[in-house]
Image (cartoon, helix red, strand yellow):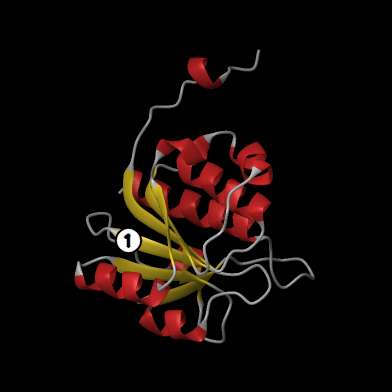
Amino acid sequence: MQLNHYASKFKKQTFSVVLIADQVARLANIGGLFRAADAFGVKKIILGGPRIELNRKTWNTSRATENAGIYKQIEATSEVIKEYKRSGYQIIALEITENSKPMHKIKIDERQPLVLIVGNERLGIDKSLLQLSDVICHIEMYGQNSSMNVVQATSIALYEITNRIKHA
């Protein structure tokens, strides 16, 4: 029998991970990012770029996880990333580039807090934000498509990151 949210066997845990979603525009994707962040114990979500009014599309996808109060919206994404970098966070960008490394090959120090940056559905992460990153990684894919949906990619990355932290 399937367990509901209240009878789940999962232990609630929060990790020192900040998810920065820069210029993600589709409301359903934002809702999906809230849900993924909740599932993987993300400490905070930052929506970068022009302010977005959340609506029913967001709420239907997020299943009320936006109500956890762990998100904020900002316009100057680069300034926030610089602040986290000065505070000792490892900055990881999730993007396919000429120099990106496969996700499973990047080094993650479980004692160091980190920021995971994801980008716009069509354009990806802005070059200026990639330059602020300590490492750029991608998820290896084996089909003919060269990318995947931002929520799917973020979920895979957060699963990988939080499992490495938890089992270190």
Q: How many marks?
A: 1
Q: In this view, does 86 lie above or below 1?
A: below
Helix, strand or loop for disc 1 = strand
Residue 131 in which image quadrant: bottom left
**Which residue does the numbered mark 1 point to in the structure image?**
114
Location of residue 153 (image quadrant): bottom right
Mark 1 Cα-neighbour bin, 10 Å: few <14, some 14–19, many ≥20: many
> Type of residue at label 1?
Leu
Q: Residue 164: give x, y in percent of width and height.
A: 38, 51
> Along the line of sight, which residue is nearer the eye, 116 or 72?
72
In this view, 158 is above or below 114:
above
The answer to whether residue 121 is left or right of residue 5 is right
Residue at the (32%, 61%) spot, across then down = 114
Question: From the viewer's perspective, is residue 155 above or below residue 124?
Answer: above
Percent x, y for residue 122?
68, 73
Where, quadrant-wise, is the N terminus in this rendering? top right
Q: Tell me where residue 69 appears, x and y as whole percent.
A: 39, 41
Q: Visible in this render: residue 167? A: no
Q: Whole-percent x and y of residue 12? A: 38, 30
Residue 5 visible to the viewer: yes
